């Protein structure tokens, strides 16, 4: 009997609860629509530029990446700018971590003066625009402190800006370590510093890593604002190039994707980290 | 026991280190300004840029810095309105059933969030001022407007001669901010439990009614606090439109600093103005949030 049932089940037409969705509801149609829309936007851009008598000169662009003269490779302004941007992000990250760590320590301390100082720093950074901060660093602090390279003024300013966010991340990471861990390490006789180094930080760092890498993405993005002062990073080089060649569209359409490649690479690194951290817990 | 002893002592070694460090820094700055740069602080120009005496009407009228601040606040409020509308549409598209809407919203949000705002501002401004502004016909509308309409419009959008400048800055800023609001809205919609949607389907509501009467009211409640934070960010980000010559606080501060050759005073004071506005907003929103939270509990 059961064998008969099995045959009947096999041969019976499958129950169609769901109607077959029409072609205009299928995935590929959505993708085609999306591609068409992107194409339409590009066409509008192209038409708009052409109607302003804009001359497209893509062929002039490659030489601003690199040139080979007498078999020698010479980087153009766009690649040089990219290197400066990466340099800003790298040094900025080191200083950001330092400032964030110091601020977090000050906020956790018993000292009133330290907590007030940290609070003033955080509120100042949070409640003023980055552009104004950069102006203050460049026009006020640079001459006062006698920094003679605007690049370092820019890195310092970005580090102070991102340091406020880094300190929040570090604080949250340390707060997420259960109180029992502190008590346990005290009860086995570890001191304050050793508790942090051997017990708390190894647990907190895993949680802090993904958002801290997010700060690296922000450093790359915010470094573009440094074009406001004389720092020769990617956006500044792009603006100078436009000033020289009037190829605004070509240059921005190339510089945008350059940033996109860096930030998306870093972002996917973040989500990879997040997945790894999530799995190990 | 140890903790108690620690609490009794009022000042710590760290207090002295911090105070000494701050004092040292202040002293060094004062030494550099006074002795090395031989700079004389002169704040006397600032008040005249806040308000000036108008001989014709014999009253105090706001001068550049206050005008800039008003433009900043005006552009932030309008950008918040426009960006919220765009953001809600994009955020809903992000959670839509149709892949097409998800793709469009994903591409827009991804592009804006992963490329620095500066290149976008230049591109947007270029397009908006050359293509969209003639299409909107704002300049023509201003020319043909009656004095009464113009007076009303000036309250909302600022002086007539700068109106198209203002609107193009406003559109650029809204397009940037919409991407961030879209993410907030998406998070709010996704935070509504799936059971709510299913319950709506069970009682036979249409998809629109489910969105309108079940999902959005709950999502909005979750979305309001981060949106308030976004408004403060918007006030700060509005300084970016100074790069495309929109005449708001940062742009005017830049001009005053150059014409007066008083970079120290003008920039520090501008930072202070932003701080007062943003900090006041932060305090007000914090207070409101507490009150709303109290009523819910």
Image: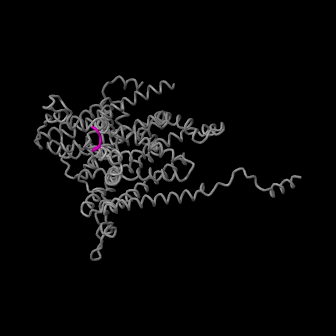
Between A171 and B9, which is closer to the camera in this rendering? A171
Residue at image location 49% in from the left, 24% down from the top: B295
Residue at image location 57% in from the left, 48% down from the top: B97
Q: How is the image coloured?
A: one colour
> Where residue B36 appears, x then y in whole percent?
11, 43
- Residue B194 in the magenta stretch? The answer is no
Between B2 and B28, which is closer to the camera in this rendering? B28
- Residue B144 in the magenta stretch? The answer is yes
Question: Magenta span covers which residues?
Answer: B142-146
> Where residue B75 appears, x then y in whole percent?
32, 40
> Where residue B258 appears, x then y in whole percent?
16, 45
Residue B239 is drawn in which quadrant?
top left
Q: Is residue B263 above or below residue A272?
A: above
Quadrant containing the N terminus of chain B in the rendered view: top left
A58 vs A37, left or right, is: left
Q: Is residue A98 above or below residue A38?
A: above
* Residue B258 visible (yes or no): yes
> Where residue B104 appears, x then y in whole percent?
48, 53
Q: Magenta segment, principal secondary structure?
A: helix
A157 vs B28, left or right, is: right
Tally the marks. 0
Between B176 and B206, which is closer to the camera in this rendering? B206
Between B17 and B276, which is closer to the camera in this rendering? B276
* Residue B73 visible (yes or no): no
Q: Residue furthest bottom?
A: A70
């Amino acid at each position: 009997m059961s064998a008969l049932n099995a045959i009947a089940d096999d041969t019976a037409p499958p129950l169609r609860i769901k109607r077959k969705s029409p072609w205009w509801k299928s995935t590929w149609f959505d993708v085609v629509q999306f591609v068409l829309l992107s194409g339409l936007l590009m066409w509008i851009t192209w038409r708009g530029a052409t109607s302003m008598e804009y001359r497209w000169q893509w062929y002039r662009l490659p030489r601003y990446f690199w040139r080979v003269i007498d078999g020698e490779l010479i980087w153009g302004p766009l690649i040089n700018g990219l290197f400066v941007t990466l340099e800003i992000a790298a040094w900025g990250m080191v200083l950001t971590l330092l400032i964030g760590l110091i601020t977090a320590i000050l906020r956790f301390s018993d000292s009133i003066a330290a907590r007030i100082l940290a609070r003033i720093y955080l509120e100042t950074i949070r409640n003023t625009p980055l552009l104004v901060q950069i102006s203050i660093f460049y026009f006020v602090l640079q001459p006062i402190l006698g920094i003679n390279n605007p690049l370092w003024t820019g890195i310092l300013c970005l580090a102070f800006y991102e340091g406020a966010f880094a300190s929040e991340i570090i604080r949250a990471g340390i707060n997420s370590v259960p109180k029992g861990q502190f008590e346990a390490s005290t009860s086995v006789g570890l001191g304050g510093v050793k508790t942090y180094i051997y017990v708390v930080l190894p647990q907190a760092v895993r949680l802090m890593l993904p958002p801290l890498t997010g700060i690296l993405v922000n450093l790359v993005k915010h470094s573009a604002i440094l074009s406001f002062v004389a720092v020769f990073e990617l956006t500044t080089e792009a603006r100078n190039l436009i000033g020289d060649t009037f190829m605004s569209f070509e240059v921005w359409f190339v510089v945008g994707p350059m940033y996109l490649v860096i930030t998306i690479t870093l972002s996917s690194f973040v989500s990879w980290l997040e997945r790894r951290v999530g799995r190990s817990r | 026991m140890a903790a108690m002893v620690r609490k009794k002592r009022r000042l710590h070694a760290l207090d002295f280190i911090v105070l000494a460090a701050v004092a040292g820094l202040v002293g060094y700055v004062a030494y550099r300004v006074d002795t090395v740069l031989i700079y004389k602080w002169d704040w006397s120009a600032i008040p005249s840029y806040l308000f000036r005496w108008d001989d014709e009407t014999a009253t105090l009228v706001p001068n550049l810095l206050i005008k800039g601040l008003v433009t900043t606040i005006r552009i932030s409020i309008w950008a918040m309105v426009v960006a919220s509308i765009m953001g809600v549409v994009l955020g809903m598209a992000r959670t839509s059933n149709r892949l097409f809407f998800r793709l469009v919203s994903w591409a827009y949000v991804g592009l804006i969030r992963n490329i620095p705002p500066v290149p976008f501002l230049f591109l947007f401004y270029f397009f908006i001022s050359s293509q969209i502004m003639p299409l909107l016909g704002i300049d023509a509308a201003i020319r043909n407007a009656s004095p009464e309409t113009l007076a009303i419009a000036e309250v909302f959008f600022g002086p007539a001669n700068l109106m198209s400048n203002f609107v193009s800055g406003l559109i650029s800023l809204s397009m940037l901010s919409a991407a961030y609001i879209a993410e907030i809205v998406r998070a709010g919609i996704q935070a509504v439990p799936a059971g709510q949607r299913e319950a709506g389907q069970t009682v036979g509501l249409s998809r629109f009614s489910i969105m309108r009467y079940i999902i959005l009211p709950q999502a909005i409640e979750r979305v309001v606090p981060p949106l308030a934070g976004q408004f403060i960010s918007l006030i700060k980000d509005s300084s970016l439109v100074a790069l495309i010559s929109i005449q708001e606080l940062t742009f005017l501060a830049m001009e005053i600093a150059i014409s007066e050759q008083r970079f120290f005073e003008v920039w520090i004071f501008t930072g202070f103005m932003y701080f007062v506005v943003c900090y006041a907003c932060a305090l007000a929103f914090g207070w409101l949030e507490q009150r709303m939270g109290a009523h819910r509990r």
